[in-house]
Amino acid sequence: TTRRGARFSVGGTVRIDFVQANAARASDFFLANTDGDLKQKETNFSAAFSAGYRVSEYVSLSAGIGRAVRTPLTLERYSDRFPSTKFQTSAEFLGNPAIKPEASLEFNIGGTVNFRQMRLEADLFVRSIDDYITIVADPSVPRRLPLSPPTVFRYINGTKANFFGFDLKAARSFGKYIDGRASLSYVRAEDKFLNEPVIGIPPMQGIVGLRFHSFIENMYIDLSGEFADEQTRIAVSRFERRTPGYAIFDIRGGYRFTKFASVNAGLKNIGDRFYANHLNSLNPFTGRRVPEIGRNFRVGLELFF
């Protein structure tokens, strides 16, 4: 970092992880159908560097580059035909003790503009992951439970996965009593090993909102809308399903009546819209994505100490 008031700033971090993994016991089936020793050791190195530049009183720019290494999860190594919610299916998954950690390299640039009563933020990133941990169907592996889907998946190291995305945010004050905000985010990701989109990537989504400050001190009302585009970029080989787009609207408000307590209330999904988040799991009986709750009301009391 740099001294206060400087136009240029830098920062960095370094991390080293020493990992030991082992499974005390494993079934004969697991040992016969997987490769590698149960006991594994890793030394993983990660680092990041960032820089910022204040162009003027109103404009700031930033950039960063980083390398991160992720060690495999316990289930990715030792799952003995266990289910996983990560892949939005009730299928069984077989681990791989010899699976390698995945290493990502990311570059991002961003900027902030503050002018009068408006603030704009933008961030753009590109990420490449080597030895990307993914799954493939293996018809030769029998399922463990009779009610599970017939296809068992294996955890594997693919070759590479590429990600690209952005986040945009805007906020503006419209006088003494009204503030507005909006945000938009998008990620596009491609699994190069399977030549299809990475599984479990949300579609373009955003939020818009207005907050009204009452002439009564410590009281507010907030109106917001949340929307998501249809997700058609899906991992077909892993049975990922499309998700329809949606738009829902909420209202909430609150009043802090003492410095020790406030009361708040909200109505979410005012139109009682039937919708589902793309990252929700699939219902194993219907095959449809588990929906979010419909119109719902809440009221709360917060205490401050």
Image: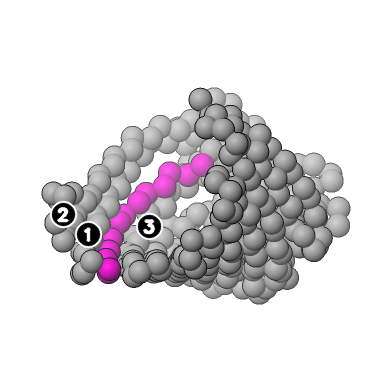
Is 62 contained in the magenta span?
Answer: yes
Pointer 3 or 2: first along the chain: 2
- Residues at marks 3 and 2 touching, judged by CB atoms closer than 8 Å: no
- Residues at marks 1 and 2 touching, judged by CB atoms closer than 8 Å: no
| Place of residue 205 in the rendered image (x, y in percent of width and height, measured from the top left) | 59, 67
User: In this orientation, which residue lies closer to the viewer: 293 or 174?
Assistant: 174
Q: Amino acid at mark 1?
A: Ala
The residue carrying pointer 3 sits among few (fewer than 14), some (14 to 19) or many (20 or more) residues within 10 Å by Cα, namely: many
Q: CA distance from mark 3 to mark 1?
A: 20 Å
| Place of residue 8 in the rendered image (x, y in percent of width and height, measured from the top left) | 16, 60
User: In this orientation, which residue lies closer to the viewer: 252 or 87?
Assistant: 252
Q: Amino acid at mark 3?
A: Ser
The residue under label 1 is 51
What's the residue at 58%, 66% (across, down)?
208
Q: CA distance from mark 3 to mark 2?
A: 34 Å
Q: Amino acid at mark 2?
A: Gly
Numbered circle sitting on residue 5: 2
The residue under label 3 is 104
Q: Main secondary structure of the magenta part?
A: strand
Pointer 1 or 2: first along the chain: 2
Q: Is residue 253 visible?
A: yes
Is 131 contained in the magenta span?
Answer: no
What's the residue at 48%, 30% (across, down)?
22
**Label 1: which secondary element:** strand
| Place of residue 253 in the rendered image (x, y in percent of width and height, measured from the top left) | 65, 50
> Of the residues tagged 3 and 2, which is closer to the observer?
2
Q: Is residue 150 visible?
A: no
As drawn, is 184 to the left or to the right of 18? right
| Place of residue 301 in the rendered image (x, y in percent of width and height, measured from the top left) | 66, 34
As drawn, is 18 to the left or to the right of 27? left
User: Which residue range is magenta in the image?
Assistant: 58-73
